Every structure is written in C-alpha cells, then in structure tokens.
Amino acid sequence: MRYVSEKKHGDIQTLKDTLGDCMVEQFELVGFITRGVVDKGIDTWQVSGDASSIYKSIFQRPSFIDSIKGLYCHYILKF
C-alpha cells in the first residue's frame, strides 16, 4: 500500500513487476487503484482517493494538534 500511495501513478507492468499480479488484481478489485490507457496504448494505473485516505489514517503519525484533539475527545468528552 505504501508503494501505491507514494508512487501515485505509473504503467501497470512496472506495478505488476514490483508487487506481483495477484496484489495488483486485489488492489484493483477493492478500488485502491484504477486502470487507464495512454494514447500510445500503454496500460497505466492511478491510486484512488480511498487508498490515499486509508494509507494516511493507518500509517502516518498524527500531528501534534490531532494528538491533542484525540486526548480531548478521549478524556474530556468521555464524561
């Protein structure tokens, strides 16, 4: 998921060489990537907005402000 989220787009063959046919197929089925074709007939891919959002929410550390908001919600709004 990191490779797809950071790379954002490219040709499908390179993606298959990097991740494998099965993983590319699974990413396409769940909607993490969409396929396209450029004018030269080359199969391409592009990361979807959903994949970027999921990657950020799972793998990126929250900012200082987001941490404070989380603590506020957990401890203050709990009552």
Image (cartoon, helix red, strand yellow):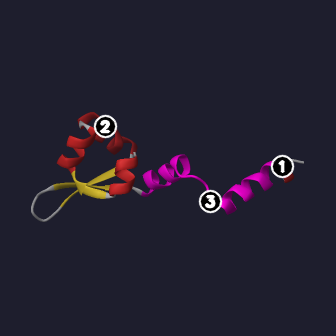
The numbered disc on residue 61 is: none
- Choose between 7 and 33: the one closer to the eye: 7
Please, what is the three-letter code of the amino acid marked with disc 3? Answer: Ser
Q: Is residue 5 magenta?
A: no
- Mark 2–mark 1 distance (CA, rounded to whole Å): 40 Å
Q: Which residue is mark 2?
A: 23
Marks 2 and 1 in Cβ contact (< 8 Å): no
Percent coordinates x, y for residue 65 in the rendering: 69, 63
Q: Which residues, given as a range, are shown in magenta?
A: 49-75
State the residue at coordinates (31%, 37%).
Answer: 23
Circle 2 or circle 3, nearest the eye: 3
Residue 55 horizontal side relative to residue 74, left or right: left
Q: Which residue is mark 3?
A: 63
State the residue at coordinates (13%, 56%).
Answer: 42
Q: Which residue is mark 1?
A: 75
Please, what is the three-letter code of the amino acid marked with disc 2? Answer: Met
Circle 3 or circle 1, nearest the eye: 3
Percent coordinates x, y for residue 61 in the rendering: 57, 52
Q: Earlier in the sequence, mark 2 or mark 3?
A: 2
